Image (tube, helix red, strand yellow):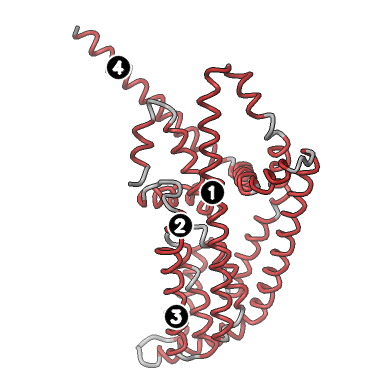
Amino acid sequence: MMKEKIRAQDENIFKITIWIIFLMLLVIILKSLAFLFIPFSISLLLCYALGIPIDRLRRLRVPSSLRIFVVVLLLMSFVYLFGRLLSANIIEFNAQLPMLEEKFWGYVNILLSRLDVTPTQVRESYAGFISSLEGTDFKSAGSFVKHLGGSFFSFLGNAVWVILFMIFMLAEQDEFPERIVRAFGKDSSVTIIEALNRINMAVQDYLGLKTMISFFTGILVSITLFLFGVPFAVLWGVLAFLLNFIPNIGSMISVVPPVLITLFQFGSLTKTLAVFAVLIALQTVVGNFVEPKMMGKGLNLSPLTVLLSLLFWGWMWGIPGMLLSVPLTAAIKIAFEQIEATRPFALMMAGK
């Protein structure tokens, strides 16, 4: 009896060790091949997001190849127009950066006149801080913003891979259930297909509602800033739209740039505080009232799970990982629910 208990404990320890090694190898692979998995994950989520128009075209009995062509063409047209709009605003913003930076150092000098600190010391500390962020010798805020812009458009350069992945996924979408049946048998495939359908519905509903809410948030931010006369209102609206996909912190981060621009442009503390108050109120109403009411339980992830997934995927893949964190974590949770051994982890990840 004692030997059987020891043997059972050894087997459990062995299984736990195997799982730990497997997870470590999986993390290493995902991080090392980020250049491949990031476009693949984005393509997968786009397939979910495009599920509604594809279903509409399928009901109209549009052939599969024509459905894919129409949807991909519409998506590429939207991305092109969106990129042109964003690029024009970034170019204009970069053109005015020297003037904004001059105003910034003017405010700093006024503040330093009351302290025993020289502007040269502050500039050296500022340059050292910026250099430590990327290991690059940034000379000004302008070069830092240009560096971020270059990284952003480098990311957009992967759009070719995203489109290719998406085309092949859409082309095989109709045949995928049949392949599962052939691979796992009719009885075993029922559970797998049911889990995949749950993932499809949960992620598709989340992306659809989140995109709509983020879109209207961006529009409201742009209109608000335009009424206040803040420069680059469209750019900050686009930023609010994108960052709203990052849970918890994205919407708050999007408030910082327009508030700083308001201060540097007008030099009025009253107007800056007014812009800050309106934007915070807008994000609070959308984040705490509108979004929960429209999305309901949503993906049923606890706030701690969302935060940890944000940190993990952000560490793995940077900003794209933060944008993908919630859908990826929700898919993992639903997959865990289908396996008896991992079901307790799914319950721990769930909300109320």
Give the residue type that dot 3 points to.
Val
Between discs 2 and 3, the one toward the N terminus: 3
* Residue tagged 1: 205
Image location of residue 249, percent across then percent down = 43, 62
Residue 148 occupies quadrant: bottom right
Q: Measuring 41% from the left and 46% from the top, which residue is drawn there?
A: 300
Residue 2 occupies quadrant: top left
In this view, the residue farthest toward the front is 60
Screen quadrant of the N terminus: top left
User: Closer to the observer: label 1 or label 2?
Assistant: 1
Crowding at mark 1 (Cα within 10 Å: few <14, some 14-19, many 20+): some
Q: Compare residues 165 and 191 and report the one nearer the observer.
A: 191
Give the residue type that dot 2 points to.
Pro
276 over 245 or under it: above or below: below
Crowding at mark 2 (Cα within 10 Å: few <14, some 14-19, many 20+): some
Image location of residue 334, percent across then percent down = 46, 37
Q: CA distance from mark 1 to mark 2?
A: 16 Å
Image location of residue 150, percent across then percent down = 66, 63
Asked whether disc 4 touches disc 3, contact meaning CB atoms under 8 Å apart, the reply is no
* Residue tagged 4: 10
